[in-house]
Image (cartoon, rainbow, N blue to C red):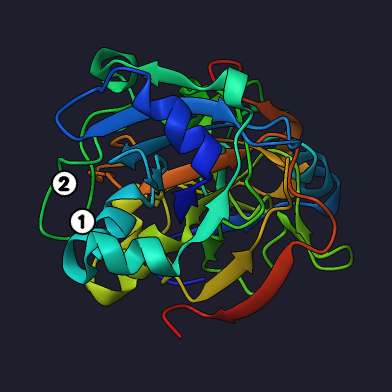
Amino acid sequence: MIYKVFEQDANTLLEKPETGIGYQIISAFQYERHIMRKFVVYNTNLAVELDSEFIYHKNQVVQRGYNLMLGKSDVIMLETNSIKVLKKIDVENKIDYTNNLNNKGRYSGGKGAIDNPEERSNGTESFVRISAYEDDRRVDMVNKKLKPGSFATTKVDYLKCVMLNDNPIDRYALPNDEEIKWAFHINPKLGDILQRGVVQPAFGHIGGGIEAYFKSGTSDGTLISKRPYGK
Amino acid sequence: MANRKVLKLSEKYATYLEELPEQGMGYQLVDIKLKDGRVLLSRVVLNCIFLKLKDDEDIKNDDIMDLKICDDY
């Protein structure tokens, strides 16, 4: 997501060093939400969340312009005292969001989801579980949620896979022989725990897609829809 | 199921696997102890219920003594 930084927080950022020319990578708690989040902040005013959708949103800023995006974005308030400016090295071991493995938008570097730290959903990010099975047993259709210990991918990565006509079995390194036919769309609630990472090579497949692991599953009501894959 | 051989596990094992973590999107790796003493290691189960078999394998649910998630994962 892209946000306009609350004015008081922007003034705080002005007093802190940059991470690079014209930008700061920061971690901070969102005001009254007790959720630690990371952002790349441009010119102390425009914050792009540093998650798996970062490249997509950064490209929006580049293509549509800083001022336009600043005018259109919701304001985000941070716990001012929690704002920390990070050095590049603090985030270098994370997913390499700038290095796509191939022109299908896959990623290199990083680790699998279960090897990365837990984070809490911001309540706005969407995920998709792809499956060869309409009756996927990891999806609780009664309580409309993902069961504990289940994987999904981000909606952004799923859309890349579909729109770039990538092979999902290779992208997500699946041992399936059956065609992927279904997509379960999930919007975790604020605070649902997940770990995200890059799919590692397995079963003769390259991987490189984004995976998200929900150790505790997702909250009730987070399964939004079941659709044919790619629709 | 297309192409490859699979064994549809009994509901007992499917229910057991549903309660345990996946190792990737849609699959789990399990170790299986057969009644004839053989042990099958790191075998793929899809959707908590479909055990992937090798082409020359002929295993039935009655052949299975025990099944558990791989310790390595």
The chain that hosts pointer 2 is A
Where does the image place residue A105, in percent across and percent down from the top left? 20, 56
Q: Nearer the viewer, residue A189 or B73?
A: A189
Residue type at numbered disc 2: Asn
Residue A230 is marked as none
Where does the image place residue B50, in percent across and percent down from the top left? 61, 55
Judge whether residue A222 can be spotted in this image: yes
SS under mark 2: loop
Q: Label 1 to label 2, Cα distance in Å?
A: 5 Å
Q: Is residue A164 above or below residue A4?
A: below
Say which residue appears at 28% left-offset and 44% top-offset: A207
SS under mark 1: loop
Q: Is residue A123 left or right of residue B23?
A: right
Say which residue appears at 34% left-offset and 58% top-offset: A169
Q: Nearer the viewer, residue A196 or A55?
A: A55
Looking at marks 1 and 2 on the same chain, the residue that comes earlier in the sequence is marked by 2
Q: Disc 1 vs disc 2: Cβ atoms closer than 8 Å? A: yes
Q: Which residue does the numbered mark 1 point to in the structure image?
A: A105
Say which residue appears at 24% left-offset and 22% top-offset: A19
Where does the image place residue A158, in percent across and percent down from the top left? 40, 64
Q: Is residue B29 left or right of residue A226?
A: left
**Image quadrant assignment for residue B66:** top right
Where does the image place residue B55, in percent across and percent down from the top left? 39, 52
Judge whether residue B41 can be spotted in this image: no
Number of residue marks: 2
Residue type at numbered disc 1: Gly
Q: Which residue does the numbered mark 2 point to in the structure image?
A: A100
Same chain for mark 1 and mark 2? The answer is yes
Q: Nearer the viewer, residue B62 or A74?
A: A74
The chain that hosts pointer 1 is A
Say which residue appears at 34% left-offset and 65% top-offset: A69
